């Protein structure tokens, strides 16, 4: 908690005695166990004055008042903790946190979790953590406003954006309480008090971690509670849901920290890769905790971590995410369409569409192999396309002349360029300027993704061979499992899905099996492909935006590509029931319209999923996807005066200058340039005749009017770069 700046606030509320509900005597010890740890300088680091302990006999109004004040004052961390009874109530079966006066018949004495959610979500705190230790606490995870037939909320209804919600149980499970405290909070307090030590996933050790993130805490609690029973009752597994990097929120310092491992000069580079943001994201991915069984889980998790580490090394990125010599050596640093945060956005949406929108993540019945493919996909995709761009860089992305090359790839590229004559002419006309290169790189990307040979199994096999991870002492059956999960044809199908979605044949839509005997598990390939396709669309690759965007490069009213990247990084998809609404502030009307068309494409894709399922329910992995998306919150930026930088009514009426010229002089309207000239002359002649008649009328009615003599002149323009520079 000490890693942020600004003021932090915590609100803790534990209720052990009730007027009507059964007592939970152990809960009286929960807050006293946590508070000293949260305020300890070597653990939580919070000031005592910043921690509000709500009395156990407080009313729901008193709790909400305390939470309101804390949410209003917090600028760094806002922590909310509740322990007690959780129950459902009201006609809509809402989720409630019980107070001393609560009863099932009088739900209004309890605290509606929706109210807690709204207060936390509305806080300006940079980090928000909600910990709920009660029965059915999984209902506090993100859900939606949609209702089931019984009227209960099902998904996204309790979402807190930019936060981490940690619960003691799933929404159908009861938490357990001992005389000395609730089981979940006892383990949480023990973890904070003792610190985290010992071997972790990916070859890490707990004592080498100076701070405990929410992912570290969740994984540790998951391991500590797994298989535990109390009086013959199974202890439920904790649940966690995050948004906007909420899993990286630091909850406490690690008391078991002994210092970072000593690095020799030979191991320093390897250590840097292990600390890479890609590696930590793959290693600590929350989806690992929702694998339906343990078959091959440990091996696949370690293999995924090592595979992503090798991908990060090849990507040539430093731990802070900046690109280095790898891109420079290949000439890819020239690419103005490259979005450094796109891979991270894909990774966020890959799990977000499953966990952030899921009432019961365990109902997904994810196999460990499916988790492996989902976790590794964003990083394999990034390296796959970087390799292809480097491989075909020799075609000359920004050389748009007809070079008559003997290279088959270059000849194919030139044939592709002939389909974009206007863009090519403009690039040639602005040769030597940044706009020319931007147009060239856009055309190169569009050409590259249409190359079917890139998606062949042999091409993907070469990538996987270079990233291959030694399996060491794994058994033959475990090795076979990894080999079949990384089967080139399977990986290629998932890499192809975002770029070239093809029709699904009924017979091929069935799950496939990987592994044998005790390691055997299913992989729902087509569901994974659909899910990844949707995740990429939500992440928004600038190259896939409407051609209208590149149409406004190299003209007077031009799109600024750094500004476009900034817009995409700040863009958010807000929840509105089962609809996602794109919220973005644009500096250019072409970007505005491009995002609106992108949202329409995504909405169409979601509709096709529903059409393909007919009257039946969506497949499990797609069940919690939004029903629709809109771009209603895409708006223009404002000038210092408060005036919008463009008017939305202009969107479909402003075109590039050379496009207007082509419309007036080319064959698009008239079929023949000669007809265009004749039509212009006829229009000018009609205008002169009208003006002459108007002049005669005004004079006849006594209006003093200057004499008028019509004149039509033609000016022949010269050619520059293959395009007319003047309009007759």
Image (spheres, grey):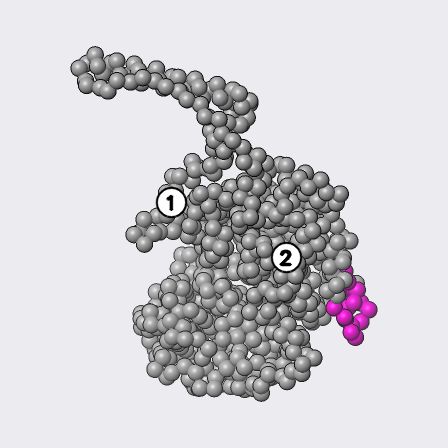
Residue 119 shows in this picture = yes
> Would you say residue 304 is visible in this rendering?
no
Give the labeled residue for mark 1. Answer: 646
Residue at 50%, 35% (x, y): give it: 658
Q: Secondary structure at mark 2?
A: loop
* Quadrant placement of the N terminus: bottom left
Q: Secondary structure at mark 1?
A: loop
- Residue 45: say if magenta: no
Region of the chain picked out in magenta, as a range: 469-484
**Residue at 55%, 57% in the rendered image:** 339
Q: Residue at x 69, y 48 (%)?
A: 395
Residue 315's place in the image compared with 449, above or below, is below
- Residue 646's spot in the image, x, y percent? 38, 45
Q: Position of residue 545 (x, y in %)?
A: 54, 46
Residue 216 left/right relative to 82: right
Q: Which mark is residue 331?
A: 2
């Amino acid at each position: 908690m000490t890693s942020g700046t600004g003021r932090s606030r915590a609100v803790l509320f534990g209720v052990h005695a009730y007027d009507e509900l059964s007592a939970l005597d152990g809960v009286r010890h929960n807050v006293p166990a946590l508070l000293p740890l949260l305020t300890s300088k070597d653990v939580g680091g919070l000031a005592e004055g910043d921690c509000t302990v709500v009395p156990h006999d407080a009313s729901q109004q008193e709790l909400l008042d305390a939470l309101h004040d804390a949410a209003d004052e917090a600028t760094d961390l806002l922590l909310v903790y509740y322990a007690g009874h959780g129950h459902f109530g009201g006609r809509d079966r809402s989720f409630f946190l019980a107070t001393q006066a609560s009863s099932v018949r009088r739900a209004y004495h309890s605290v509606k979790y929706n109210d807690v959610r709204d207060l936390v979500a509305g806080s300006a705190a940079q980090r928000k953590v909600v910990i709920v230790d009660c029965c059915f606490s999984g209902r506090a995870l993100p859900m939606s406003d949609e209702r089931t037939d019984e009227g209960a909320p099902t998904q996204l209804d309790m979402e807190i954006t930019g936060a981490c919600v940690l619960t003691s149980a799933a929404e159908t499970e009861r938490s357990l309480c001992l005389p000395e405290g609730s089981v979940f909070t006892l383990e949480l307090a023990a973890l904070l008090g003792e610190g985290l030590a010992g071997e972790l996933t990916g070859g890490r050790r707990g004592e080498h971690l100076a701070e405990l993130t929410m992912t570290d805490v969740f994984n540790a609690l998951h391991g500590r509670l797994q298989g535990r029973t109390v009086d013959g009752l199974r202890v439920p597994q904790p649940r966690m849901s995050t948004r906007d990097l909420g899993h990286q929120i630091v909850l406490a310092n690690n008391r078991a920290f002994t210092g970072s491992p000593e690095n020799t000069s030979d191991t320093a580079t390897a250590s840097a890769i292990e600390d890479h943001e890609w590696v930590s994201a793959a290693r600590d991915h929350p989806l690992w905790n929702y694998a339906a069984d343990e078959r091959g889980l440990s091996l696949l998790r370690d293999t995924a971590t090592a595979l992503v580490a090798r991908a990060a090394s090849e990507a040539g990125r430093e731990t802070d995410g900046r690109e280095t010599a790898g891109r420079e050596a290949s000439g890819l640093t020239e690419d103005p369409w490259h979005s450094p945060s796109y891979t991270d956005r894909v990774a966020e949406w890959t799990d977000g569409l499953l966990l952030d929108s899921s009432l019961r993540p365990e109902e997904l019945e994810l196999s460990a192999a499916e988790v492996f493919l989902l976790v590794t996909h964003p990083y394999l995709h990034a390296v796959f396309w970087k390799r292809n761009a480097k491989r075909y860089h020799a075609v000359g992305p920004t050389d748009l002349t007809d070079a008559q090359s003997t290279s088959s790839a270059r000849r194919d590229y030139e044939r592709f360029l002939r389909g974009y004559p206007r863009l090519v002419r403009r690039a040639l006309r602005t040769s030597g300027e940044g706009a020319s290169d931007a147009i060239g790189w856009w055309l190169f990307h569009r050409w590259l993704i249409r190359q079917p040979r890139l998606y062949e199994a042999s091409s993907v096999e070469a990538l996987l061979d270079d990233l291959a991870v030694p399996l060491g002492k794994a058994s033959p059956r475990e090795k076979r499992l990894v080999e079949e999960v990384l089967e080139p044809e399977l990986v290629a199908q998932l890499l192809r899905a975002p770029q070239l979605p093809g029709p699904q044949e009924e017979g091929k839509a069935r799950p496939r099996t990987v592994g044998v005997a005790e390691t055997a598990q299913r992989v729902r390939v087509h569901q994974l492909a659909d899910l990844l396709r949707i995740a990429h669309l939500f992440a928004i690759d600038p190259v896939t935006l409407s051609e209208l965007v590149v149409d406004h490069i190299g003209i007077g009213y031009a799109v600024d590509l750094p500004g476009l990247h900034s817009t995409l990084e700040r863009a958010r998809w807000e929840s509105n029931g089962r609809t996602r609404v794109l919220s973005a502030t644009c500096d250019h009307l072409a970007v505005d319209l491009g995002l609106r068309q992108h949202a329409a494409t995504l909405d169409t894709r979601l509709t096709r999923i529903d059409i393909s399922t007919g009257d039946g329910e969506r497949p499990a992995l797609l069940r919690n996807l939004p029903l629709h998306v809109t771009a209603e919150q895409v708006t223009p930026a404002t000038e210092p005066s408060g005036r919008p930088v463009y008017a939305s009514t202009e969107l479909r009426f402003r075109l590039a200058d050379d496009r207007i010229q082509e419309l007036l002089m080319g064959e698009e309207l008239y079929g023949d340039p000669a007809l265009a000239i004749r039509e212009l002359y006829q229009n000018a002649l009609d205008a002169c005749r009208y003006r002459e008649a108007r002049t005669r009328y005004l004079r006849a009615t006594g209006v003093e009017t200057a004499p008028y003599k019509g004149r039509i002149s033609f000016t022949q323009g010269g050619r520059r770069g293959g395009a007319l520079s003047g309009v007759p």
